[in-house]
Image: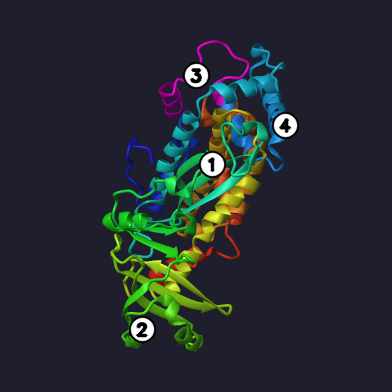
Amino acid sequence: MSKEAVEVAPNSKEELQKQYTSFQDILSDEEFDKMAKKHQVESERERKLWLKPFFWLMVFSSATPSARGSLLQMIGFFLGAALLLFPEKKMSSLTKGAVSQHLKGTSWYFFRRVYNHLLVKYENILGSEQKKYLGKFKDVFAIDGSVIALCSRMSKIFASVHKDKASLKLNTKFSIRTAALTKLQVGSGRRHDSKFAFVTQAAGILYIVDLGYWSFGLMQKIIDAGSFFVLRLKSNCNPLIVRVVHKDYPHLVGKRLSEINDFLAQQTGCGKIDLVVQLSSAKKPRFQAEIRLVGLFHEDVWHFYVTNIFDIAFTPQHIYDLYAARWQVEIFFDIIKNVLALQHIISRTKNGIMVEIYSALIFHLLTLILIAITAKQENRSIHEFSFEGTFKVLQGVMISHFHRFLQPSLAAVDEIFQALIRIISHMGLSSKPLQTFSLEQQFHA
């Protein structure tokens, strides 16, 4: 997250309503211009397409319901509005070439900076009430990756695991607590997940990690930081049982997991086991930490998970539910790749691809910000609101008012900004809150 100004979160509904009455409370003209200057992306010379319209053109095109080729439709919206607002600029000759030049030449770091700026605003809106998750963790991150196929001409920049193909991999650090992406690494499809450095020195963090990142070194790093992890047990790992949590089965101590199949067959009625194990099978293991292993019998199969959460309040079922909450990052990938149409990347340069990725992420985060403001005013959890429903409202209202974003000041957006919050408060609630909300309720009852 950006090191920019740390703000004091509003403490009440009234303070929130007073603070967030304008779109510029989210992103002001001054903040936008300051970030543009920082990354030297605003040219002094006259252009057919200057920075601010290009920025919103890319953000809104990521939210159109058809493929990314609908950028032409957005150009049409842009030209129609520009002709009315700025007839002296004579912009009727704007072409895809002008957009292409911006994709090549406008630094994607500017788009990332805007995203990080909005992320700080989002955290500030959520406020102190959500600074602890499940009553224990400062944050809960799902760590996962996803691959996007690219045009084969991009193979020299983003090589795929398949010969003469191109693909990029998105490695993500996704907050289950806030439903927002907090760190992104974009690399070639060949890049191994282990290259993604996501563990910080902050203590009290829970990392729910996909199996592709499994390593003893990672577990030790999390333990050394004073944080926690939950991973699915790797199939070729055969841990040594060193202790039983509930003292009921002392005969298991000293055995490997593969040696207790008969015992597991007798426990299907109970449906769970809770053990303390040593994971390494080496005679002189470098990773010697004792780890908790929980198993649940579900759909005729035992599922095993390892964690360093020894708090008995977190039962095997809770550990299972925590790992299942990782599914939220899969939903995020689906939204980014399909609803926001990232599977139809149009740029043929690395810079342009990164601009398109962060444009989609910015629209995603703007949707979350509107949910957060509405949830705070309605005294609800953000996890009770439908992202898809809010996204559709935002998509329809903001794109139909695209011309307002071409005005000299973003103050022109204020009227629809307030209207959006009112609409979401009536239409944004989900008929079935996310599983994350159920977990929240269990630990805050």
Percent x, y of residue 102: 58, 22
Quadrant showing the N terminus: top left
Q: Give the class, few, some or many, for how many residues have Cα within 10 Å of label 3's Cα (few <14, many ≥20).
A: some
4 vs 2, front mark: 2
Where does residue 25 sit, x and y in percent of width and height?
Answer: 44, 37
- Distance, label 2 to label 3, CA atoms, is 67 Å
Seen at 56% across and 38% down, the residue is: 357
In this rendering, the answer to whether 232 lies above or below 139 is below
Magenta span has 8? Answer: no
Q: Say whether disc 1 or disc 3 marks the residue closer to the N-terminus.
A: 3
Q: Which residues are magenta?
A: 31-52
The numbered mark at residue 252 is 2
Say if mark 1 contacts mark 3, CB within 8 Å.
no
| Picture residue at 35% right of the left edge, 71% below the top | 292
Which mark sits nearer the N-terminus, 1 or 4?
4
The amino acid type, in three-letter code, at marker 3 is Glu
* Residue 43 counted in the magenta span: yes
Q: Which residue is mark 1?
A: 361
Q: In the shown orientation, is residue 255 left or right of residue 357?
A: left
Residue labelled with disc 3:
42
> Viewer-proximal residue, 377 or 53?
53
Give the alpha-carbon distance from disc 1 to disc 3, as whole Å.
22 Å
Q: CA distance from mark 1 to mark 4?
A: 20 Å
- The amino acid sitting under disc 4 is Gln
SS at mark 3 in the image: loop
The secondary element bearing badge 1 is classed as helix
Q: Is residue 236 above or below residue 215?
A: below
Q: Amino acid at mark 2?
A: Leu
